[in-house]
Amino acid sequence: MSPRQEKILAAIVEQYAEVAAPVGSHLLARAFGVSSATIRSEMAELEKQGYVTHPHTSAGRIPTDKGYRFYVNQLSKSGDIKKPKERVERALAARVAGGGLPEQTIRNTVDTLVELTHNLGLATIGEQLYMSGLSNLFGQPEFMHPGQVQQVARLLDNLEPWLYEAAPNEPLSVYIGSENPIGRAAGCSLIISRFRSPFSDRSYIGILGPTRQSYREVMGLVGRAGKALEDTLYV
């Protein structure tokens, strides 16, 4: 992939996350200072390689799971994950510091992630999985179809046993769309941070949302939440 194609793919991912509509060449042409024809040519090449696709009713493009994976890998490689704003840092710190018992601290932190990302938040507390923000998840435009809702419900039903069985070992793990071991057709991404707590050396906190989301921001938030919990709870 050429450097320009990489930037165009990133722009499609980020713009689609914001507007939930296919991204057209005119918008990107203005952003890149080139002609619409040049952008269309680059988009066609990205589509040929499987990084984007286009709904049959639109000439605009949306990312595929492969496109999202490339984008997330580049974020991780470059360290270009968005650092939470100062007010967000303060909100997280206040929730973590003021939680009291470890269980309540973790719940408070999950609830904060829900408020900040408008996705479903989750965390392991001992042998239980705490989830919050279900209405946020099913309020997303991707999940208006009953069949899609069923796939998401299947993923949620099996998420707790999978987490304990798989025990992801990376500090921050991202499972995009069909990469999810369960509910592969749910169109969801799971972003989780491992942290040490009084309950386990491998506790997890994260969010579950549509594949269409602001990965730079959410990965930063989830990673920060995990670190804040570990710094506070693991002594």
Image (cartoon, rainbow, N blue to C red):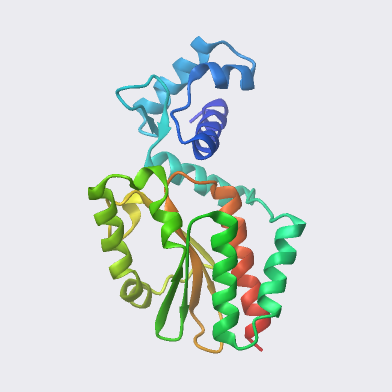
Residue 176 shows up from this direction: no
Q: As displayed, is residue 130 above or below residue 199?
A: above
Q: Is residue 202 above or below residue 18?
A: below
Give the residue displayed 50% in from the left and 65% down from the top. Answer: 206
Q: Residue 185, percent across and down?
A: 27, 50
Can residue 139 be seen?
yes
Question: Is 58 rendered above or below residue 21?
Answer: above
Label count reads 0
Task: Give the side of residue 80 with respect to residue 64, left or right.
Answer: right
Q: Position of residue 87 (x, y in %)?
A: 75, 58
Image: 12 above or below 191: above
Q: Quadrant of residue 182?
A: bottom left
* Identity of the residue drawn at 56% across and 81% down: 196
Q: Residue at x 60, y 57 (%)?
A: 116
Decide if residue 169 is on the left or right side of residue 162: right
Q: Which of the image's four quarters has the C terminus?
A: bottom right
